Amino acid sequence: MSDQALSTFDRAREALDKKTRYVQDFPEKGVLFEDLTPVLGDAESFAAVVDAMAEAAEKLNAEIIGGLDARGFLLGSAVAYKLGLGVLAIRKKGKLPPPVVTQEYELEYGTAALELPSEGIDIAGKNIVLIDDVLATGGTLGAARKLIESCDGHVSGYVLAIEVPGLGGRDNLGARPVIVVRDPQ
């Protein structure tokens, strides 16, 4: 990486370290939740994280940015704008008008589904970089990859702000590059 790349990522890591809010026992006992809301709400921190994520997405040859519902929309939209690309909003089931393409996936407590519009956006053959705030189990990102592939799009990689260690998230993502702005501590 160039000095510029290192300084971009260093600024983003510093912003994440300073502004991330930690909430013990949320959403359930034994979980330390890393809330990026304060990062998103601070202009300088938000810009630092978006700059690093945009740099990573560019290295992955993004043609479209896929943002996952909901914080991935915020980060993905900003990254897409910075790179002059379109953004693909990957929605939770029931949030889009029909017709849609749906991909179900397993959660630790049941099932969920993601959807894309089945018309109006042509992603066939396009390199799509998936962006979200946190990589935990990788279930949602893995489902997003399958959803995009079912529409003949190509996921060229994943860009995340942070990763929760010990949950095996990368195992659900296939053999695609994963770039995390702040590596697990």
Image (tube, rainbow, N blue to C red):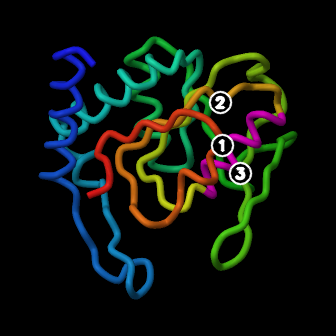
Where in the figure is residue 173, as x and y percent of width and height?
62, 46
Q: Which residue is mark 3?
A: 114
User: What residue is drawn where x is 14% and y is 43%?
Assistant: 14
Sequence-earlier tag: 1 or 2: 2
- Mark sitting earlier along the chain (2/3): 3
Label 3 to label 1: alpha-carbon separation: 18 Å
The crowding category of the residue bearing disc 2, from other C-alpha atoms within 10 Å (few below 14, some 14 to 19, many at least 20), is many
Q: In the current view of this chain or complex, which residue is farthest to the bottom?
A: 29
Q: Residue at x 35, y 50 (%)?
A: 162
Q: Is residue 90 above or below residue 65?
A: below
Q: Is mark 1 in CB contact (under 8 Å) with mark 2?
A: yes
Q: Quadrant of residue 6?
A: top left
- Residue nearer the viewer, 137 or 112: 137
Eyeballing the image, is 102 above or below 175? Answer: below
Residue beneath the point at 84% across and 43% down: 98
Return the mark for residue 155.
2
Labels 3 and 1 touching (C-beta < 8 A): no
Task: Tell me the residue at 22%/63% (across/down).
Answer: 21
Where residue 63 sits in the image (x, y, percent)?
58, 15
Report x, y in % for residue 147: 76, 41
Secondary structure, magenta segment, majority class:
helix
Q: Nearer the viewer, mark 3 or mark 1?
A: 1
Q: Residue 156 magenta-drawn?
A: no
**Badge 1 amino acid:** Gly
Asked which secondary structure carries label 3, the reply is strand
Give the position of the N terminus as an image quadrant.
top left
Kindly indicate the quadrant of the structure image that contains residue 157. top right
**Residue 92 location (% of width, % of height):** 66, 54
Q: CA distance from mark 2 to mark 3?
A: 15 Å
Residues shaded magenta: 139-150
Instruction: Give the mark toward the camera: 1 or 2.
Output: 1
